[in-house]
Image (cartoon, rainbow, N blue to C red):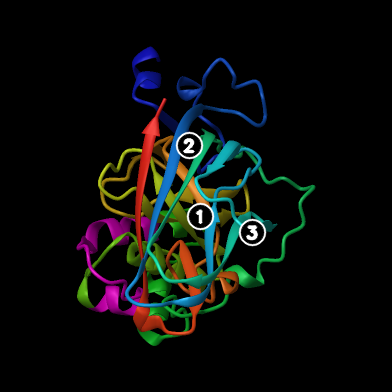
Amino acid sequence: MYKLLQRKFIVYSILFCTILSSAQTPESNSPDIKFKRDVDLTFHYKLDVKHYAGNVLFKVRIPYSIKNRQTVNSVKYSVQPDSVYTIATTTYAIYKLHNLEKNLKINIKCNLTIYKYVPEKVDTSIHEDFSEYLKPEKFIETELPAIKNLATSLKNKDDIETIMNTYKYIHDNISYMRKDEIGAANVLETGVGKCTDFSDLFVALLRANKIPAKSMHGAVVVNDINPLHAWAEAYSKKQGWIMFDPTIGAMHVSQFGNKYSIKVKNQYVILCEKRYDPEMFNQTTNFAYRCADFNDFNVKLSVTLEDH
């Protein structure tokens, strides 16, 4: 057990809604905390001005405290935003930059405690509208024949079995390639994609089988080069929302008869729980901006993540 905890793994069975006791920490009597980890996530924004950008509206996402998932302990800004607001589980900081004519650097350092929490059963006190997590959208082309046909072939009478069939298909048939995101249909056709594409295909196939699924965007602690990452969550009627990372190498799944167990590291920081965010002008990056002349303005982002 000690070696397991040292590796920061949590193991759980998802078919029979039972968390394996070998993975629980001494805090496991708490319904909210199964495993915790303190991290520093820092966003380094470089706003490049070629000539004169004029007035710029610059908006970024920062982590938000989510029960059982993560607690934001502090946020430090090198440049104070004009306003900060939260919608659902996403927090935004807005900068209203006037007469911008020189380059500007903005660093935002967030200290968080992240938890690995796996629900043992559905929380009946929460009444969710799943319509948003069942519909097609850009890059999640649930309605296309190729997606629907494959989803049908992966369907099982039990939603967990369908979810696991979908996960195993992507794991066995899609290869990782770092490039521009191409969406579920193109990933299925080409057999390659990056983390966002893995997530898109996983979500699209589940939605095609009427299983609620959502895209998750944030950062992972272990990736020193570019910690920004995308994964997914699927809704089980027995356990509720369960995290899945379909990108190759991110999870280890074992099957014992009709049981499944998953090993996943406690390494995920959530920034957004949707594929497209209207608050970010439907851009898919962690920042968005509006200005008079886009040719005179550009933003570069680097992210560092430190484990305590």
**Which residue matches tag 1?**
233
Q: In this rendering, would 221 be left or right of 211? A: left
Amino acid under disc 1: Glu
Q: CA distance from mark 3 to mark 1?
A: 33 Å
Q: Position of residue 226 (x, y in %)?
A: 29, 50
Camera-nearest label, 3 or 2: 3
Q: Position of residue 23 (x, y in %)?
A: 46, 24
Q: CA distance from mark 2 to mark 1?
A: 16 Å
**Crowdedness near tag 1: few (<14), some (14–19) or many (≥20) residues, C-alpha within 10 Å:** many
**Which residue matches tag 3?**
82
**Marking on residue 8:** none
Q: Position of residue 142 (x, y in %)?
A: 46, 78
**Which residue matches tag 2?**
13
Q: Does residue 10 show up?
A: yes
First of labels 3, 2 by sequence position:
2
- 8 or 83, nearer to the observer: 83
- 282 or 196, nearer to the observer: 282
Q: In this rendering, would 91 be left or right of 295? A: right
Residue 27 is covered by the magenta coloring: no
Query: Quarter holding the N terminus?
Result: top left
Give the structural element (helix, strand or loop) at label 2: strand
Identity of the residue drawn at 19% across and 63% down: 177
Identity of the residue drawn at 24% across and 58% down: 172
Query: Quarter holding the C terminus?
Result: top left
Residues rendered magenta in the picture: 165-189
Residue 176 is covered by the magenta coloring: yes
Amino acid under disc 3: Asp
Amino acid under disc 2: Ser
